[in-house]
Image (cartoon, helix red, strand yellow):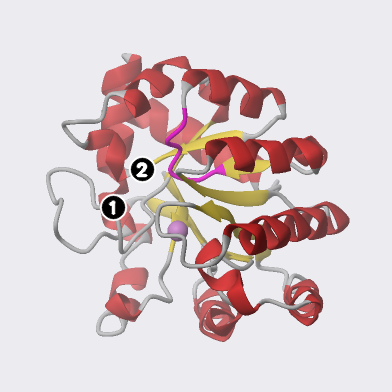
Amino acid sequence: MLFDSHAHYNDEKFDDDRDALLASMPENNVGLIMNSCSSLDEVPLIFGICEKYPFVYASVGVHPHEVGSMTEGDITTLREYAKNPKVRAIGEIGLDYYYDFSPRDIQKKWFARQVELAKELNMPVIIHDRDAHKDCMDILRACSVRETGGVFHCYAGSVEMAREILDWGMYIAFGGSLTFKNSVRPVEVAKYVPLDRIVIETDCPYLTPVPHRGKRNSSLYIHYVAEKLAEIRGMSAEEIENITYENAKRCFKME
Ligand code: NI
């Protein structure tokens, strides 16, 4: 059974077939899905999806792209939303210096504030770190993320950085980029991370794995990530599926 630890089924790319697609998950060996949130506007639709599908859970949080106009009132709103029993994480939160859609000082401020909220609520964090490794690690260290844990989504850092993340008790997520031909560093990291700290994800509708790269992604393709990981670790895909399923449940405190 597979656990897709990072998906965006609220995305408009699923508007035409969201229900048919989600209804087909159980028969396709997808047992659990974490729907990651990027902005407060998305929450009503995400909660609607969670209510309809018992196997879909949610995070709430504001993505670095969206923090430009964030206020302390939004933290209060997030705290309220987090009372929904399907909410199991604060995310996705972090820093994105690739796009820089929000000023960096603003990104850092609201990233740290949301890590503090996660600690207050005793919820794991879902981290988005794009081209911002140093500042991201500095903030997580300063906020003692080890008190609440969580996952680095679509991990793109080094083995050395992974070592510190693992020391904090966090999990490392691999997605479609692991299957890309030019994927050297993720493969190196995937060899290194202890088996009990790896989770897998699609980040759908984005980051579609080989051989469907270019098409819209969905959790129906997550088995390609499991298969690639199995090949890297010299194990069966079924073993990887089961291990990463249990890991994600533990990461999101679902047991
Ligand atoms: Ni995402």
Quadrant, the N terminus: top left
Q: Which residues are magenta?
A: 152-157
- The residue at the point 69 percent across, 22 percent down is 167
Relative height, residue 71 to residue 219 (above, below): below
In percent of width and height, residue 143 lies at 80, 43
Instruction: Give SS at disc 1.
Output: loop
Quadrant observed for ligand 1 in the rendered image = bottom left
Amino acid on which disc 2 is placed: Gly
Q: Quadrant of residue 236?
A: top left
Name the residue carrying label 2: 175
Amino acid on which disc 1 is placed: Leu
Tell me if label 2 and label 1 are in contact, CB under 8 Å: yes
Relative height, residue 201 to residue 164 (above, below): below
Label 2, label 1: how far apart the Cα atoms are? 7 Å
Farthest residue to the right: give it.
Answer: 120
Q: Residues within 10 Å of mark 2 (few under 14, many from 20)?
A: many
Instruction: Give the left or right position of residue 170, taking residue 243 as reference.
Output: right
Answer whether residue 99 is magenta in the image. no
Residue 207: give its label.
Answer: 1
Q: Residues within 10 Å of mark 1 (few under 14, many from 20)?
A: many
Depth order, front residue of 248/20: 248
